[in-house]
Amino acid sequence: TFCGTPDYLAPEVIAATGHGKPVDWWALGVLLFEMLCGKAPFTGDEPLDTYHNITNQIVSFPWFFDAEARACISALLHKDPDARLGSLQSGDHRGARQVRHHAFFEPVDFVQLERRELAPPHPLPVIASKTDASNFDPDSDDEESDDEEEEEGEEMEEASLVQIGAAKAAEKQGTTVRSSLWDKWDTVSVDQT
């Protein structure tokens, strides 16, 4: 049985083909994506949908990911564990050293980080007491009802169908349609061979 968050499972774990340290590099790729974007790179409505997406989809990046972030995350989310960043057999740069030498991590002084000498990039929150919850969104634990979620899902599905229909109609006329949603995302494919 699987235990944990489905979003972080590496393809080889899902396929039950055996796994080792490369699953940790995969999880780092998912974590970096989620920290930069606020959501996991491969999701689904049900765990089986998420597993399917992990094993079959190419990661899509929001427009605001820079080239180094895209390259690092793509290399960490390589479907082939032997070709994944951190697993490549290239001289002295293997494992964590290989990941640390990626251009994405160039600004990080790992010696200072290990010594805990780096200042946080943002101010630390002020906490008045053990029960102080003022740094949390007061609505963060309010859950939508199933009806609201279903309505929202139907609206998104209808909007997607309208966008697809408009794009097909425009294609027939030799024109293009730009969507604010489509402008924000693009897909970067990674050579998985």
Image (spheres, rainbow, N blue to C red):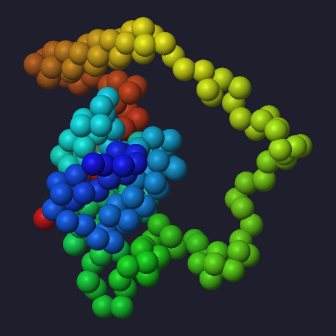
Along the viewing direction, whichever of 14 and 111 lies nearer the viewer = 14
Residue beneath the point at 73% across and 76% down? 117
**Hey, which residue is sitting farthest right in the picture?**
128
Along the viewing direction, whichever of 154 and 177 lies nearer the viewer = 154
Along the viewing direction, whichever of 55 and 180 lies nearer the viewer = 55
Residue beneath the point at 70% across and 59% down? 121
Q: x%, y% of residue 115?
A: 69, 80
Q: In which quarter of the image is the C terminus?
A: bottom left
Q: Looking at the image, can residue 191 be seen?
A: no
**Hey, which residue is sitting farthest bottom in the picture?**
92
Residue beneath the point at 29% across and 16% down? 157
Q: x%, y% of residue 22?
A: 31, 69
Q: Looking at the image, can residue 89 be seen?
A: yes
Along the viewing direction, whichever of 87 and 107 lies nearer the viewer = 87
Q: In this view, does 73 lie above or below 137?
A: below
Residue beneath the point at 83% across and 44% down? 130
Relative to 113, 79 lies left or right = left
Relative to 76, 104 lies left or right = right
